[in-house]
Amino acid sequence: MIDVKNLSKSFGDHLVLDNISEHISPGEKVVVIGPSGSGKSTFLRCLNLLETPTKGTITFEGTVITDPKVKIDKIRQQMGMVFQHFNLFPNMTIRKNITLAPVRTGLMKQEEADKAASQLLQRVDLADKADAYPNQLSGGQKQRIAIVRALAMKPKVMLFDEPTSALDPEMVGEVLDVMKELARDGMTMVVVTHEMGFAREVGSRVLFMDGGHILEQNAPKEFFDHPQNPRTQLFLSKVL
Amino acid sequence: MLQWFYRTLDRFHTAFLEADRWKLYLQGLGVTLEMTVIALILGTCLGLVIAVVRTAHDQQRPGRRNFLLGIANVFCNIYTTVIRGTPMMVQLLIWSFVIFSTSRNKVMVGFIGLGINSGAYVAEIIRGGLMSVDIGQSEAGRSLGLNYFDTMRFIVIPQAFKNILPSLGNEFITLFKDTSLVSAIGAAELTYHASRIGGRTFDYMPPLIGIAVMYLAIVIVFTWAQGRLERRLRESDRR
C-alpha cells in the first residue's frame, strides 16, 4: 500500500531521516515509537508529503507520490491524518469541520456529507455537538472529532501523529477507544505514539526509531518481551 | 479679555460663515472622505493580491516552483520596496506632475496616488495576518485533500481577518489624514479649501484650527467604531 524507499529528510544541515526503507501493507496497524527527536513524526509527515523528502521515493497504491508532477491533493484525499494538537478549524461548527473537505473536493453533496457527518458523530458519541464550535469542546472530544473529520473523506489509510500527547490523562482513554474500534474495522493505520499499551494491544507491528533510523521492528509481543537492540532495551526500560 | 474673545469670534465668523464659506468646507470634507474611501478600496484590493502572491510564493513546495508566480513575486517586492521607501509627498508630486501631468482631475490623481501608496502597507498588514494563523490549520486543510486556494479561502483568511482588522483600521486613519497632502497637487479637498480661505481673508488661524478639529472629530468617531467592532469579534471567540 505504502512503499518507502531510501527516504532521507534534512532540515538545513540537520539530518532527521537517514535512508529509511519501509513497506506498509493494507490492513496493517504500524505503531512507531521512539524518543523525541528521533524523526518519527517527520517520517509520518513525509508519508502524505506534509514534509517534502530530501531524497528517496514514496509510493502509494502504485503511484510515486514524491514525483513533482503528481496531484498531491488527490493522494491526500485518500490518506487521513490526525494531529497532536487536533487542528480543528475554530471558525466553523463541528458539522462544517467534518463536511468541508468532502463537499469541496467533490466527494459528496452537502446533504450527503451532512448525513455522513451525523453518522460519524454518533459513532464517537458526539452527535449532540454537531452545531457546537471547537472551543466549546474538551481535548478528548476535539481529538475524536478530528478523527471523524479525517474519516469523512473515506481514506484508505489513517496517519496518527501523537494523537494523545496533548490530552489530559483522563481523556486519553476515550481517544484510544475510537482508534481501537477503527483498527477492529480493518483500517490501515500508522500511529506515532508514546502509548505502549496501545502499541501492544492494537499494533500488528512496532517500529522503534532513533536518530533517523528504524533500529528495530517486530510483532508487539516479541518486541516488548524480547527487544534485541540495546538502544531499544534502554528505551523500553525507561518507559515501561 | 472679553475684547479678545469677541475678536476671535469675529475671525471665525469671517472664516466660516461669511459669504457662505462653510459650504466650501463641507464640499472639501466630502471630497476628502470620498478620496479616503476610494483609496482604501483600491489599497485593500491591491494589498490583498500582493499579500496572497507573496504568501503563495513563500509556501510553495520545494521542487515545484511556479515560474509565473516567481515573476509576480519579484514585481510585488519591487512595488512594496519603492512605495515604502519613498516619501508619500514625493510620490504624489510625481503622479501629478510627471505621470498625469496633462490630467486636470486632481482628485482622481490624488486617490490613485493614495491608493497605490496604501496598497503597499496593506499588503504587509494582510501578509502578517495570514502568517499569524497557526501553520497546523493549513496543514490540516491540506491533509484533508483541499487545495491551496480552498484552504486559504475557508480556513486561513477567515481566521486572519480578526488579526488584520485592528491594523487595517489604523491604516484607514492614516490614509484619511494623508489626504490632506493631496492639497499640494491642487485637489479641492478640505485642507485645500482651508488654505485658500486663509489666503483670501488674510487670516490662517481660524480655518486651520477649524479643519484640525474636523479631522480629529472624525478620527475619534472612527476609533470608537473600530473598538466596538473588535469587541464584537472577540466576543464571538468566546461562543
Image (spheres, coloured by chain):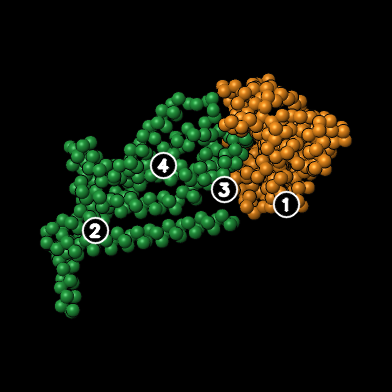
Chain colours: A orange, B green
Q: Are marks 1 and 3 on the same chain?
A: yes
The amino acid marked with disc number 2 is Leu
Contact check, label 1 and label 3, Cβ < 8 Å: no
* Amino acid on which the number 3 mark rests in the picture: Asn
Q: Which residue is drawn at the image coordinates 15% and 60% (left, top)?
A: B198
Q: Is residue B177 left or right of residue A187?
A: left
Q: Do marks 2 and 1 both belong to one polypeptide chain?
A: no
Amino acid marked by disc 1: Asp
Q: Is the N terminus of chain A in the top left, top right, bottom left or bottom right quadrant?
A: top right
Mark 1 vs mark 4: tell me if same chain: no
Query: Disc 3 and disc 4: Cα gap in Å?
Result: 23 Å
Residue that badge 1 annotates: A168
Chain that bears disc 2:
B
Q: Secondary structure at mark 3?
A: loop
Which chain does tag 3 point to? Answer: A
Q: Is residue B170 left or right of residue B210?
A: right
Does residue A84 lie above or below B17 as drawn?
A: above
Residue nearer the viewer, A91 or A8: A8
Give the labeled residue for mark 4. Answer: B123
Q: For the residues labelled 2 and 4, say whether their Cβ atoms are less than 8 Å apart.
A: no
Between A132 and B91, the one nearer to me in the picture: B91
Single out the mark in the foreground, 3 or 4.
4
Residue count near mark 3 (Cα–Cα under 10 Å), binned few <14, some 14–19, many ≥20: some
Q: Disc 3 to disc 2, how far (Cα)?
A: 43 Å
* Residue at figure coordinates x 48%, y 37% from the top left: B55
Label 4 Cα neighbours within 10 Å, binned few <14 / some 14-19 / many ≥20: many
- Tag 3 and tag 2 share a subunit: no
Q: Position of residue A186 (x, y in %)?
A: 79, 32
Q: Residue at position x 38%, y 58% from top?
A: B222
Viewer-side label of 2, 4: 4
| Disc assigned to residue B26 | 2
